[in-house]
Image (spheres, rainbow, N blue to C red):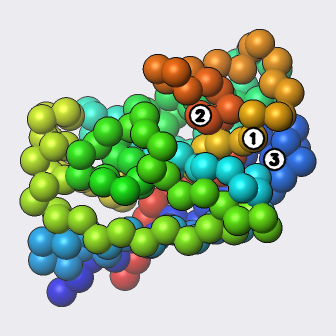
Amino acid sequence: MAEKYRAEIQSLNGDKLGIHPSGEADFTIDNDTLTVEITMNQTSPNTQHWMHFHGFPDGRDAKPATIAQDVNHDGYVDLPETEPVSGTTMVPFNDKPAEMNIPTDTYPVSDANGHFHYEKQVSLKDIQKKFKETFNDDELHLEKRVIYIHGIPESVDLPDTVQGSVMHYDPHTTLPIATGKIEKVD
């Protein structure tokens, strides 16, 4: 019997950005296949959106960040500020999730209305193998994870206090715009 998980995704940083993304993510584990389906609305239009689940390698339960995590009080919750409650970036939802290669240009791009739909089937065995190599655990523990949707256009003016550069990608790419807790569905 398939295991099902869902996250209701809500806006983060919406008041500062003037966008209020929302959507849902569904995860189904059936035998050796993990199917991931993410639908988002009201994101920044025509923008690539990095998406991942975040969590704690030690098994603690991750929580979605809120404005309470804005420790430098610049009005934005940036990627580093999410870590105390949400943990680290774990599995990307790009063209090859099982490779767990985070910084790529292979994430979904929203349409002119800020909508996108992502669907991918992944070998559970492959993703568990890479997860074990990276986090020393071959169980994904989806019920202890949160999903983040990232990314705003380069044209948006961000204060220097917004952090989160990853390699050559600046905080425009990594700024969280939406998040949700992944929960097991009965």
Label 3 close to label 1 by CB (< 8 Å): no
Is the residue under label 2 in contact with that under label 1 (CB below 8 Å)?
A: no
The residue wearing badge 2 is: 174
Tell me where residue 180 sits by quadrant: bottom right
**Quarter residue 170 falls in:** top right
Q: Nearer the viewer, mark 3 or mark 2?
A: 2
Residue to which mark 1 is pinned: 153
For the point 61% across and 35% down, the residue is: 173
Label 3 – label 1 distance at C-alpha: 14 Å
Given the image, on which type of amino acid does mark 3 rest?
Answer: Gly
Residue 30 in percent (x, y) is at 20, 79
Q: Quadrant of the C terminus?
A: bottom left
Q: Please state if 143 lies on the left or on the right of 22 as rendered.
A: left
Rendered residue at 76%/57% (across/down)? 45
Residue at mark 3: 14
Q: Is residue 72 above or below residue 92?
A: above
SS at mark 1? loop
Q: Nearer the viewer, mark 1 or mark 2?
A: 1
Looking at the picture, which amino acid does disc 1 mark? Pro
Of label 1 and label 2, which has the lower sequence position? Answer: 1
Give the spatial CA distance, label 3 vs label 2.
15 Å
Determine crowd level at label 1: few under 14, some 14-19, many 20+ residues with C-alpha closer than 10 A.
some
Q: Left or right? Give the position of 86 relative to 140.
A: right
Q: Position of residue 31 (x, y in %)?
A: 12, 77
Question: Real-space Cα distance between discs 1 and 2?
Answer: 11 Å
Which numbered disc flags the more N-terminal residue, 3 or 2?
3
Using the rendered image of the protein, determine whether residue 22 is visible from the camera's viewpoint. Answer: no
Residue 181 seen from this side: yes
User: Of helix, strand and loop, which one carries label 2?
Assistant: helix
